[in-house]
Image (cartoon, helix red, strand yellow):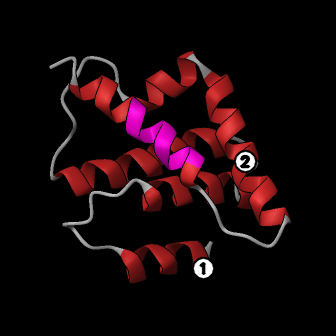
Amino acid sequence: MDRCISLIHENWTGADQSMTLPAYVLWRMNWIHPFVEGNGRTARAACYYLICMAYGDLLPGSKSVPERIRDNRQPYYDALGAADRAWADGQFDVSELAAYLTVLVKAQLSEE
């Protein structure tokens, strides 16, 4: 967890609107599995927090990114699996997860 938090601090810039850092947090917290229960919920909450921080406020829209993930989990699981496979091959690649989050954020913002 310490490395995960350190990486966030080292790479955070308020102007960075990339989904890479939130995607990393979402994947890494699930991968580290630091809690007995609630790893997915906590990871999704942390990810969403970073997205909102980059946005500068809570995102508008009636259905949040974590709710969208909960309602349709298979793309979420698929994207986490892609990151896991990349890691197993010695690569860091959360691009599929970042692309998935981008779609969810756009959907949430379109509901203003």
Check the image and report above or below for 13 versus 20.
Answer: below
Asked if residue 60 lies left or right of residue 6, the reply is left
Q: Is residue 99 magenta?
A: yes
Q: Nearer the viewer, mark 2 or mark 1?
A: 2
Check the image and report above or below for 3 versus 105.
Answer: below
Is residue 33 something that shows in the picture? no
- For this rendering, which residue is in front, 102 or 72? 102
Q: Are marks 2 and 1 in contact (CB under 8 Å)?
A: no
Image quadrant holding the C terminus, namely top left
Asked if residue 40 lies left or right of residue 85, the reply is left
- For this rendering, which residue is in front, 39 or 83? 83
Q: Which residues lie in the magenta part?
A: 96-103
Figure disc tally:
2
Q: CA distance from mark 2 to mark 1?
A: 21 Å
- For this rendering, which residue is in front, 112 or 29? 112
* Residue at horizontal 77 percent and vertical 64 percent from the top: 87
Q: Which residue is mark 1?
A: 3
Q: Quadrant of residue 14?
A: bottom left
Q: Is residue 107 magenta?
A: no
Q: Residues within 10 Å of mark 2 (few under 14, many from 20)?
A: some
Asked if residue 84 lies left or right of residue 74, the reply is right
Secondary structure beneath dot 1 equals helix
Asked if residue 91 lies left or right of residue 50, the reply is right
Query: Any mark on residue 36, and which?
Result: none
- The three-letter code of the residue at mark 1 reads Arg
Q: Which residue is mark 2?
A: 82
* Residue at horizontal 22 percent and vertical 36 percent from the top: 59
Nearest to N terminus: mark 2 or mark 1: 1
